[in-house]
């Protein structure tokens, strides 16, 4: 039984075999992305399918508690609450919050449900917390956003690899085979405040203070310009706006960046020369430079570097960003962002609205306009938003200023959650609708290469749960909009998705289930059934009106919340190998829970000594928004002024209780990667 992993955007192929009452996963050696390899999460993914904590019946709240209910009662209650709020406050008082874990079909159907059956503009998804800054920067520069505009194999073949703010050995372990191949003959630069496992393999490790990525990138570009190591011909023929950027980086010399970031000026020069001297280079950014109140500028600064070197569109070269969620790419392509319609169409573009409206059989003016983005939507609950539908997401753990979000969701008039475990968010709901899992239903996913993959149903689901498509169809019927989803067959919905995306930037018009079943490797855009797909973008032109890529003037900005006397240390957050996102699945898998039972706070031994803290001792971290108690983990590889905590746990261990809710003005990405904290030693009893 062949399927794909439910976790990250590599979408590694696996097989499932029955093992008594459970299933056992193994890597699928026939799939080129992972060639049979899986990470520890993939190997244990099947443990969720028959997990004893799995939701098998709908739940409704009565007398302050959730109790089991029939599907009819639960769906009636869910729809009645949505209808009541809509009638009392208007359709915009209902919010819909989606997920990068949804298949393309479900993401598309959720958009139709929100915009037609509910009629709300306030529809966004948790991918806004992941990819939005890089997406905005790529659209600004290239005219479209695809995680990797080139095949994964190019990573193995490039002569110089620059990775900014991502520990790939932890976040995407099956990429190791590409990284190991690249290291055999190539050079590597890593930019990260921590000396991670990946950073230890680098020829140059730049270790900036959190939030100073633009300063470092601009200094790298300054060196390239000053030493005339840029590709003037490429710049002249394929880009615009370089002159303004050149003037802006004239004063951004490495010594200035050193004062701002703490990175030695000579190390910046060494890294810039290494990039320029390589016959091929790839620049990859992760969440490190992106999850900031200037995250779009952080990604743009590295895109500027790539353009100045003439990388995008050249063999074994380019700029890419590392998509986190399994379908973070496809999830936004088909309308899960409040400003987008299927096919990457802009919701405020008249032609885009007309095309989608024609496919949907409605008047263009009936489509809602631009609505609230993810954190704006959550933070409006209880004020502007009085009902919320959450599908396959756990914002009580994943959102910044999490204690405030929990308070709002606990008090909202109507909360409906679709999930297969009782997450921290589902615990607060008025109605919980149990859904099928990844191996129990068919649908397509789009990996970080823009490659569309068919994940076929290969496991018989237990009695009780229903597919998200069936749930949405039932809600549409109860809301008086039965024609919005005429069926819940994923292939039929994909056929409609093809028409809706046709002619858009993310054109799936030529992709069919049959072509995918026949083993074709299809990356969008793929406009017609004879088209082979587009694994490499930008070879001849960019997706801009004039075909040229645009440089952007970006400047280092003071942090929204810099360390100060009361909160003197930087806090940054991230992922670890054994857990995934909000941990709704992985924290329930016994081998993963044993390997990583709780979060920790990583700190330099000198910082620990200054506070009288020993390894493994409990400490309290305090920000302007709250406090968390965690055990110390000492590591000489982290900056002495920085603390690192993984974000996969909820409740009293939720580090997003502390993180800042400052938003990037373009992407509306929260500033997860840096806030100011103080550290207090927790006295032991006795």
Image (tube, rainbow, N blue to C red):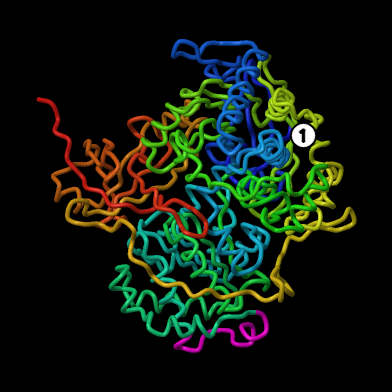
Q: Main secondary structure of the magenta part?
A: helix
Residue at image coords 17%, 40%: 681
Mark 1: give few (<14), some (14-19) or many (20+) Cα within 10 Å: many
Q: Is residue 44 left or right of residue 617?
A: right
Decide if residue 43 is in sight here. no
Seen as rendered, the residue at the extreme right is: 530
Q: Is residue 59 left or right of residue 602?
A: right
Q: Secondary structure at mark 1?
A: loop
Q: How many marks?
A: 1
Q: Which residues are magenta?
A: 225-238
Seen as rendered, the residue at the extreme left is: 686
Q: Is residue 641 above or below residue 83?
A: below
Residue 59 in the image, given as x and y percentages of width and height: 56, 16
Q: Is residue 35 above or below residue 157?
A: above
Residue 626 in the image, given as x and y percentages of width and height: 28, 39
Q: Which residue, given by chain and number where applicable, does mark 1 sit on?
A: 484
Q: Is residue 87 left or right of residue 442?
A: left
Along the line of sight, the residue nearer the viewer: 439 or 362: 362
């Amino acid at each position: 039984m062949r399927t794909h992993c439910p976790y990250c955007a590599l979408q590694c192929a696996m097989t499932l075999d029955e093992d008594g009452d459970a299933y056992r996963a193994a890597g699928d050696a026939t799939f080129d992305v992972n060639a049979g390899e899986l990470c520890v999460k993939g190997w244990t993914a099947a443990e969720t399918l028959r997990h004893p904590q799995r939701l098998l019946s709908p739940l409704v709240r009565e007398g302050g508690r959730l109790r089991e209910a029939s599907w009819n009662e639960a769906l009636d209650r869910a729809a009645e609450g949505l209808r009541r709020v809509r009638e009392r406050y208007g359709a915009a008082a209902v919010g819909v919050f989606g997920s990068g874990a949804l298949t393309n079909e479900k993401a598309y159907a959720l958009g139709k449900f929100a915009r037609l059956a509910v009629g709300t503009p306030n529809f966004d998804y948790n991918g806004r917390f992941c990819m939005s800054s890089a997406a905005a920067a790529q659209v600004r520069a290239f005219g479209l956003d695809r995680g990797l505009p080139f095949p994964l194999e190019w990573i193995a073949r490039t002569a110089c690899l620059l990775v900014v703010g991502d520990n790939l050995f932890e976040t995407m372990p099956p990429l190791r085979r590409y990284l190991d191949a690249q290291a055999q003959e190539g050079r590597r630069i890593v930019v990260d405040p921590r000396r991670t496992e990946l950073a230890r393999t680098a020829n140059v490790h730049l270790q900036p203070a959190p939030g100073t990525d633009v300063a470092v990138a601009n200094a790298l570009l300054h060196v390239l310009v000053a030493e005339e190591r840029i590709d003037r011909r490429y710049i002249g023929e394929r880009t615009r706006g370089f002159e303004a950027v050149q003037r802006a980086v004239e004063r951004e010399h490495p010594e200035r960046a050193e004062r701002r970031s703490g990175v030695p000026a000579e190390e910046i020069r060494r890294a810039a020369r290494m990039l320029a001297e390589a016959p091929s280079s790839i620049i990859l950014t992760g969440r490190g430079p992106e999850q900031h109140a200037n995250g779009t500028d952080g990604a743009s600064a590295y895109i500027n570097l790539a353009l100045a070197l003439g990388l995008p569109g050249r063999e074994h070269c380019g700029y890419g960003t590392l998509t986190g969620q399994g379908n973070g790419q496809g999830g936004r392509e088909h309308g899960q962002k409040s400003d987008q319609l299927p096919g990457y169409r802009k919701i405020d573009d008249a032609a885009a609205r007309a095309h989608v409206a024609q496919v949907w059989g409605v008047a263009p003016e009936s489509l809602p306009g631009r609505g609230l983005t993810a954190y704006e939507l959550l933070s409006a609950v209880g004020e502007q938003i009085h009902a919320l539908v959450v599908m396959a997401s756990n914002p009580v753990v994943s959102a910044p200023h999490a204690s405030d979000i929990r308070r709002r969701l606990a008090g909202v008039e109507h909360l409906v959650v679709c999930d297969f475990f009782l997450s921290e968010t589902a615990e607060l709901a008025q109605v919980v609708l149990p859904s099928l899992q990844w191996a129990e239903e068919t649908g397509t996913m789009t990996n970080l290469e823009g490659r569309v993959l068919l994940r076929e149903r290969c496991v018989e689901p237990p009695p009780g749960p229903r597919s998200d498509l069936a749930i949405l169809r039932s809600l549409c019927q109860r809301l008086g909009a039965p024609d919005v989803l005429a069926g819940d067959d994923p292939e039929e919905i994909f056929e409609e998705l093809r028409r809706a995306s046709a002619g858009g930037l993310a054109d799936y018009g030529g992709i069919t289930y049959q072509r995918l079943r026949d083993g074709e490797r299809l990356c969008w855009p793929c406009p017609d059934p004879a088209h082979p797909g587009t694994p490499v973008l930008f070879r001849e032109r960019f997706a801009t009106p004039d075909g040229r890529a645009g440089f952007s003037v970006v400047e280092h900005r003071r942090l929204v919340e810099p360390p100060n006397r009361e909160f003197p240390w930087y806090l940054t957050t991230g992922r670890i190998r054994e857990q995934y996102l909000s941990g709704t699945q992985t924290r329930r898998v016994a081998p993963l829970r044993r390997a990583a039972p709780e979060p920790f706070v990583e700190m330099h031994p000198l910082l620990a000594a200054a506070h009288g803290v020993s390894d493994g001792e409990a400490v309290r971290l305090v920000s302007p928004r709250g406090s968390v108690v965690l055990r110390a983990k000492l590591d000489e590889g982290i900056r002495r002024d920085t603390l690192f905590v993984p974000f996969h746990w909820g409740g009293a261990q939720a580090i997003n209780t502390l993180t800042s809710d400052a938003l990037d003005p373009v992407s509306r990405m929260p500033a997860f990667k840096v806030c100011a904290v103080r550290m207090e030693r927790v006295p032991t009893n006795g």
